[in-house]
Amino acid sequence: MQDGITVKIGGKVTIPVKVVRAGKNPIAISVDGETPAAGSGWRTPLTLRAAENEIEFELDVGRERRPGTYGIVVSRSWAADLRAGRPGPCSELILLHIKPAKP
């Protein structure tokens, strides 16, 4: 996704994800990026069953986002307690270009 993904405010995007696992346990993944607060999550985590390794991950781009380009990653989800660490491991940086709902 070198050029990134373009979406209008209030729209949805689908991100193809391939998970490389070290074990056979379910894992939760999320989308993380820039936020005005300490948390970096852009959506609630999605738990993948042990046999799920490739999915189409859907992200709603809410109306609270402003037009612009944002760097996001798909990552293994993490605890909300900041002492538990930050997201990771994660995908390469994905550029998400958000356009106004009406030109």
Image (cartoon, rainbow, N blue to C red):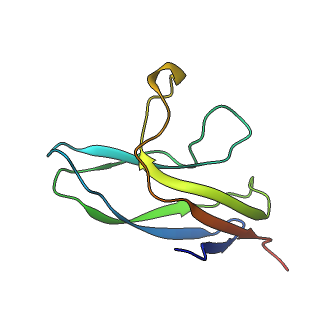
Q: How many numbered dots are placed on residues in this image?
A: 0
* Rendered location of residue 86, percent (x, y): 50, 34
* 32 sits to left or right of 6: left
Which one is in front, 49 or 4?
A: 4
Which one is in front, 93 or 5?
A: 93
Which one is in front, 97 or 49?
A: 97
Which one is in front, 1 or 67?
A: 1
Q: Give the residue displayed 56% in from the left and 74% down from the top.
A: 2
Q: Give the residue displayed 79% in from the left and 58% down from the top.
A: 66
Q: Which quadrant of the view contains residue 89?
A: top left
Q: Give the residue displayed 61% in from the left and 77% down from the top.
A: 3
- In the picture as drawn, the residue positioned furthest to the bottom comes out as 103
Q: Give the residue displayed 34% in from the left and 44% down from the top.
A: 28
* 51 sits to left or right of 7: left
**Could you tell me which quadrant the C terminus lies in?**
bottom right
* Rendered location of residue 56, percent (x, y): 38, 68
* Rendered location of residue 91, percent (x, y): 44, 57
* 62 sits to left or right of 2: right
- In the picture as drawn, the residue positioned furthest to the right comes out as 103
- In the picture as drawn, the residue positioned furthest to the top comes out as 83
- Residue 96 lies, with reference to residue 77, above or below; the image says below
- Residue 97 lies, with reference to residue 22, above or below; the image says below
* Rendered location of residue 74, percent (x, y): 46, 54
Q: Which quadrant of the view contains residue 54?
A: bottom left
* 43 sits to left or right of 49: right
